[in-house]
Image (cartoon, grey):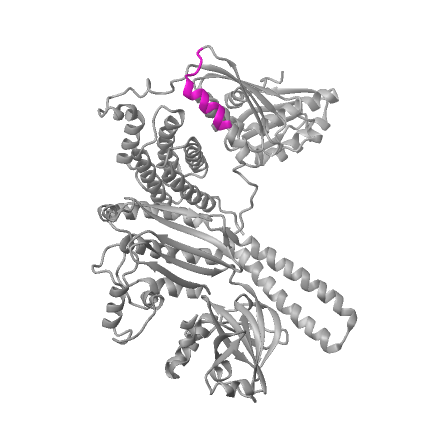
Amino acid sequence: MRIAKDESGSALHISGNLSIETAEELRASMLDLLAAASDVSLDLSAVEACDTAALQLFCSAGKTAQARGIRLEFVGMPDAVVRTALELGLPVGGA
Amino acid sequence: MAYNPVATYRQEAEELIAGIEQAVLSLGEGGDAEAIHQLFRAFHTIKGSGAMFGFDGIASFTHHVESMLDKVRSGALAASPRLVDLVLRAVDHIRELLAGSTGDEASLPPNETLIAAIEEFANGGRAAGSGLPEQAAPQADREPVGEQSWRIQFRPNPGLFSCGGNPIALFRELRKLGPCEVSAHTENVPVLDAMTPDRCYVWWTLTLRTGATENGIRDVFIFVEDESKLEIQCVSAETPAPEPDARAMVSVPLKRPADGIKESTVRVPSERLDRLVNLVGELVMNHSRLAQAALRHDTPELANPIQELERLVAELRDDVLGIRMLPIGNLFGRFTRLVHDLSAQLGKEADLVTAGAETELDKSILDQLGEPLVHCLRNCLDHAVEPPEERISQGKPRRAAIRLSAVHAGSHVVISVEDDGRGIDREAVRAKAIEKQLIARDAVLSDKEISNLILLPGFSTARAVTGVSGRGVGMDAIKRQIDLLRGSLSLATEPGKGTRVSMALPLTLAIIDGLLVEIGPDRFILPMAEVTENVELTAAERSRRNGRNVVSVRGELISYVDLRSTFGSGGDRPANEKIVIVRHEGERVGLVVDRVLGTHQTVIQSLGRFFRDIHVISGATVMGDGRVALILDIAAGVRLADRADESGAPKRKVRKQQ
């Protein structure tokens, strides 16, 4: 997994394989992101694969944003992520 | 220490295979549902973890066996000797695969013939009953059950991810059973600040439409079921299941949680335990040094803590040694298979009956016990058990029964192998012994002494050398091995009725309770377990018996060995000596020492290779003051008494009077 921050600090570009091993790093980065601005986005278009722990984190990020009144947008859901979410019966598209 | 999952898998698979062999051979005697279920579970685990650790060859092969067993479990096929044979061949093949692959490469080709045989049994099983292997369509043959809808609630253990659980894989597995709808419940997922990312907060409800039984569904969750909450409900039963399946569904899942098969255990490499035992040993030695120092300086305020320390150390010692204890059943499991194979090879029919499988023995002893027991069982099958026809003509049941049992007796475990075969032919033994010049032509020997002759090196009465035994590596090999373990071997036989070989083994090899004695300047330890009493030997008593080494203890005459002359100890003989009376294989023998000093927790240390031919001493221990005390081997001591008698005329007749 690789995480790159936008110059503005309001967007994260996440790529590679998201798994339980990288979950803590992803959590910390998303917390930073949510603390940085009130209108942020997560770009997942370069994500190759993800596991249950990663999806659970996105779910938590959504809840956190809502609780803090921050607008969080997921950008570019790759097929792999959508498929995994469907397999797990999780709602897709930040709904 | 690096954790090696592949090694762990091998180890686990070996254990599972041992369990499978035992279960499948018990099937022959009635084929109960529990044994089938156990088989299925074991193969399922081998397959599942095999795939997880890269043993793909094993996983795909095991899959065939598993499908076959599934049909037996659902009642579509009946358990039969053919099934037993196939399962045994399957575990052999899995062993080969385990030995041949390193985990990341499939180096051995799959055994196509065996797979074909398994498939044939799985598909043609019902047809085989009528004698004609009809070509049954595999698809039509699948589940005889109609489709049902199931509601599954899966609340995983929060630690699911860290134990390798993967819901994605689980649900994929479920979808193989039939169309499945998954919906996740995320209300427990906390905000990012409060979240531990490797915990699982989500839980699921699933609706599955399948022909599989509740068991089949449960098997998908087999690896995560124990820690997670799993509820499976049947929500529709449009086509009710046929009778036998309904029964299977009720009985099996009810039994499973009650059995509590999985216990919470920790795997520890045995070297670590050995190290722990060594450390406790040093602790024991240091404690006695401390105690002696305190005594020398006469400091009463140390007395209490030292006493307390002694209690704690003793407790620690017992616990540590207890950890190394393993039930002997693990070992017994292997033999069911051995007897099955050997009797087929020899054209004999025999069943192995085991008792006392839960008896525990120190792991290091258990590890060295396999070989002598295999020898024993081979002897039984080869020499003692008669061919079926001969048994029938003698009015015995056609199948011989070989009893393998283990039982606690004091500080020993007695393991015996008992058969109902032809017994030991004493005349043949005698003739052979004379031929080999082991005894004189006119020697007068008791029955027991004659049968004990076969324990001598190189003794075999078998007329022909067979592939199984009779190469002269006979009972003496067993005896030597048992002696090494500080155990003793005895034989009882009745011609025509059977033979019993008993091995008495100490519970542990590391630390024993000993009796500390002194002869001149030297100290010796006698294993406490074999000491029965101490009596005084006065100079007057000694001379009254005219130099015969016999003493009368409460009316019983007991011969004794003078250890002072055995070891050539210096110093003067005290006026009153002590005789420590030990019991060995039912005989009582006295050992004469200068003084008895008391009990001593003895940490046994081996003397090393240079001293291995000294049989009278089985080891040494370091005393509190840094001196070394030798540990006497009682069995060898008794033999010493025997030898002394041979040179010194008829003293030893005493023994035979009892």
Along the horizontal axis of the image, is B456 left or right of A31?
A: left
Along the horizontal axis of the image, is B55 left or right of B136?
A: right
The relative height of residue B118 versus residue B493 in the rendered view (above or below) is above
Can residue B593 be spotted in the picture? yes
* Quadrant occupied by the N terminus of chain A: top right
Residue A13 in which image quadrant: top right
Q: Foreground residue, B365 or B229? A: B365
Residue B578 in which image quadrant: bottom right
Q: Is residue B251 magenta?
A: yes
Q: Foreground residue, B221 or B423? A: B423
Q: Is residue B639 magenta?
A: no
Residue at image x 50%, y 31%? Answer: B222
Residue at image x 67%, y 60%? Answer: B312
> Over which residues does the magenta segment extend?
B239-253
Along the horizontal axis of the image, is B17 left or right of B382?
A: right
Prevalent SS, magenta region:
helix
Q: Residue furthest top?
A: B238
* Quadrant occupied by the C terminus of chain A: top right
Q: Give coordinates of residue B43: x percent, y percent.
A: 41, 35
The relative height of residue B271 versus residue B41 in the rendered view (above or below) is below
Residue at image x 48%, y 44%? Answer: B5
Q: Residue furthest bottom?
A: B572
Q: Give coordinates of residue B40: x percent, y percent.
A: 42, 32
